[in-house]
Amino acid sequence: MHWNGDLLDTVETVVRFSETMTYKGKPPVVELVTKTYQIGIRLTQQAMQALEAQVQRLPGLQKWFVHIPAALPAGGTLFST
């Protein structure tokens, strides 16, 4: 509803609209990520289990909504190639 039919034809337009959104009076933190991520990097099963234990999911939207705390789990290797 926020865009309400506006044409999102540039990255700048999307970022500008995103910055003006609010939820319960609070604006989002909007940052354009331009980094190219390396493909083929995967979490180990042990690392994924550790992260899943920290992730909070919204009931009914488990697949799409997660809150991930800023701190990573201590110890262990997170990534494998």
Image: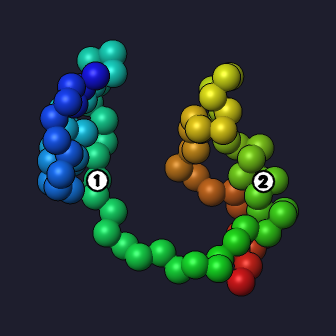
Among all residues in the image, which is located at the extreme right? 46
Number of marks present in the image shown? 2
The amino acid beneath tag 2 is Ala
The amino acid beneath tag 1 is Glu
Among all residues in the image, which is located at the extreme top? 24
Would you say 77 lies left or right of 5 here?
right
Q: From what the image shows, is residue 9 above or below residue 37?
A: above
Residue 31 has which mark? 1
* Mark pair 1, 2: CA separation: 27 Å
Q: Position of residue 66 (x, y in %)?
A: 59, 38
Residue 69 in view of the camera: yes
Give me the residue at 65% from left, 79% from top.
40
Q: Position of residue 13 (x, y in %)?
A: 15, 47
Quadrant housing the N terminus: top left
Give the residue pinned by disc 2. Answer: 50
Give me the residue at 77% from left, 62% from top.
47
Residues marked 1 and 2 touching at CB (< 8 Å)? no
Q: Residues within 10 Å of mark 1 (few under 14, many from 20)?
A: few
Would you say 51 lies left or right of 15 here?
right
Q: From what the image shows, is residue 3 above or below residue 79?
A: above
Query: Of helix, strand and loop, which one carries label 2?
Result: helix
Quadrant housing the C terminus: bottom right
Would you say 22 lies left or right of 60 here?
left
Residue 75 in view of the camera: no
The answer to which quarter of the image holds residue 55 is top right
Give me the residue at 67% from left, 23% from top.
60
Q: Position of residue 76 (x, y in %)?
A: 77, 70
- Mark 1 and mark 2 lie on one chain; the one further toward the N terminus is 1
